Image (cartoon, grey):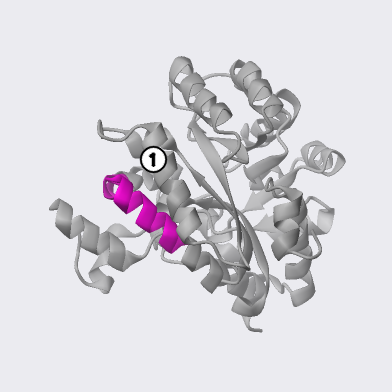
Amino acid sequence: MNFKQIPKVELHCHLEACFRPETVMEIGRTLGLSVPQDLVTFRNEWLLSKPLESLDVALAHFVDIQKIWCSEEVIERMTFEACEYSVEQGIRIMEFRYAPDFIAADKPHLDFEKIHAAVLRGVNRGAHPDLAVGLIGIVQKTLPLDAAGKTIEFMIENADTFVGLDFADQDTMPLATYAPLVEKARKAGLQLTTHAGEVPGPGSSREVSDAIEVLNAERIGHGIHIINDIPVMDLCKEKNVTLEICPTSNWLTGAVSTTANHPIKRLMNYGVPVTINSDDPSLFGIDLCHEYEILHREHGFTEKDFHACNQRAANASFIDAAEKSRVWHNA
């Protein structure tokens, strides 16, 4: 099976972790960072290619990448290259998500407006007749409420160039705290996905049910640990809430013991809406086709299964229907 030739939809890809290693090495050198200048050492020292102790350890590795997103020129270039990557992977509908606070941290010369304008220039440079791109703004749940509110307000003010918002990182306050802000964003035309159900533990499936019942989330980032909670799986089916599943990511962050033990096929067979995504492809040293190869080899996914997941993803994409139909004739 030629995985690149399969028309794909990706709903869960962090823009900051979708990069060309050569570009990071080049920019790191100009910044005076100790970035390895050969690909083997770079992969061993900067990328996450082996399982880590926890999700927290994985998040810590973003610190190095954060430094690379250092200027408007670099942001535009790396966004453009991410769009080129999408076309090369056979992706027709791509939703990139990024965190303005994350990129702007410790960079007084960059504010949200400059960052977003540079991202948009990169998307425009990367425009392709077979690619539709949407942007999701990430709200870090580790932010104080007033800072999170300012981030969401920025997304609302730019609702014509964002398609949705996402909550990521560890919970620091009840989800209900964000409900008024989410409702305001939804009135502005933004839809909601949120990271939940990713980390193993007794409260994991509750994260998913709260996201659906408290914030009315249309999609869930990961959500795999609802697998043993029949009521929550039924809730996802009833509400048609789509899971954005990232197999290799879940293995590397310790969410599953091996990719072969991943519950994606069991969730799909139960009727939970599932989609295939890469999460942080370049940081993990993978690409979306790598995820397809794993699912084909270890879970017996057929071309029909891939088509079903992609059609589901196209239907669940937050991108405008007219724009989707330009590149996805079944949308």
At 71% across and 47% down in the image, what residue appears? 320
Q: Main secondary structure of the magenta part?
A: helix
**Residue 209 location, quadrant:** top right
Identify residue for label 1: 115
Q: Is residue 151 above or below residue 241?
A: above
Identify the amino acid type marked 1: Ile
Along the horizontal axis of the image, is 33 left or right of 3?
left
Q: How many marks?
A: 1
Q: Secondary structure at mark 1?
A: helix
Q: What span is in magenta?
A: 64-82
Q: Quadrant of residue 282?
A: bottom left
Residue drawn at (76%, 50%) of the image: 321
Q: Is residue 253 above or below residue 305?
A: above
Neighbourhood count class around disc 1 (C-alpha, 10 Å): few under 14, some 14–19, many 20 upward? many
For the N terminus, the image quarter is: bottom right
Depth order, front residue of 207/90:
90
Q: Is residue 79 magenta?
A: yes
The answer to whether any part of residue 296 appears in the image is yes
Pick whichever, 239 or 19, lies toward us. Answer: 19
Q: Nearer the viewer, residue 244 or 66?
A: 66
Relative placement, left or right, of 113 versus 228 is left
Q: Position of residue 286 (x, y in %)?
A: 46, 67
Task: List x then y, in percent, for residue 139.
Answer: 50, 31
Frontmost residue, 185 versus 12:
185
Q: Is residue 280 visible?
A: no
